[in-house]
Image: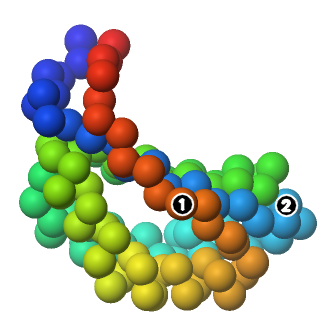
Amino acid sequence: MTEPLPTTAHVRLSRATFDPSRFEEVDAMNTRTSAYLVPAIQRLPGLIHFYAGVSPEGSAVHVSVWDTVEHARQLDHLKEMVVDARGEAEAVGVTFTPIVNYPVAWTI
C-alpha cells in the first residue's frame, strides 16, 4: 500500500545526458556529490522522496516528490545543487535539460 500524498504534492524531474563512454566518470561524480547533496536536501522542508540514477546508456535523472510546488522549487536555489553539483557534472560532460515540476495526478 502506498502512503497518502498531500493533494498539493509535486514531482520534480531533472534530466541530463552525457556521452556513454564517460559513464564511469559520471557515476563516480554522482556518488561523490551525494555526500554533500543528501544532507543539504534533507534539511529542506517538504521533501517526501528523492531518487537519483545514472544509466550506462548516457542519461541521468533526479526524481523527487515534494508536498508543494514551492517546496520543490527550493532546489532551484540550493547552492549545493545549482553551483557545486552542477559544476562537477558539467566538468564530466553532463548536459542538463530544463527541470519540470509536475502536480501529482494519481498514484498506485
Q: Secondary structure at mark 2?
A: helix
Quadrant in which residue 11 is drawn? top left
Q: Amino acid at mark 2?
A: Pro
The label nearer to you, 1 versus 2, is 1
Mark nearer the N terminus (1 vs 2)? 2
- Residue 35 visible in the picture: no
- Side (left or right) of 13 relative to 67: right
Q: Amino acid at mark 1?
A: Pro
- Residue 6 visible in the picture: yes
Residue at left 33%, top 13%? Answer: 108
Residue 34 lies, with reference to residue 71, above or below; the image says below
Residue 62 lies, with reference to residue 42, above or below; the image says above
Q: Locate residue 69, reporting x and y percent.
A: 22, 50
Residue at left 61%, top 66%? Answer: 96
Residue at left 20%, top 37%? Answer: 9
- Side (left or right) of 73 relative to 102: left
The residue that mark 1 highlights is 98
Q: CA distance from mark 1 to mark 2?
A: 20 Å
The residue that mark 2 highlights is 20
Q: Locate residue 23, reporting x and y percent.
A: 78, 64
Residue at left 17%, top 57%? Answer: 71
Q: Secondary structure at mark 1?
A: loop
Q: Residues within 10 Å of mark 1 (few under 14, many from 20)?
A: few
Quadrant in which residue 67 is drawn? top left
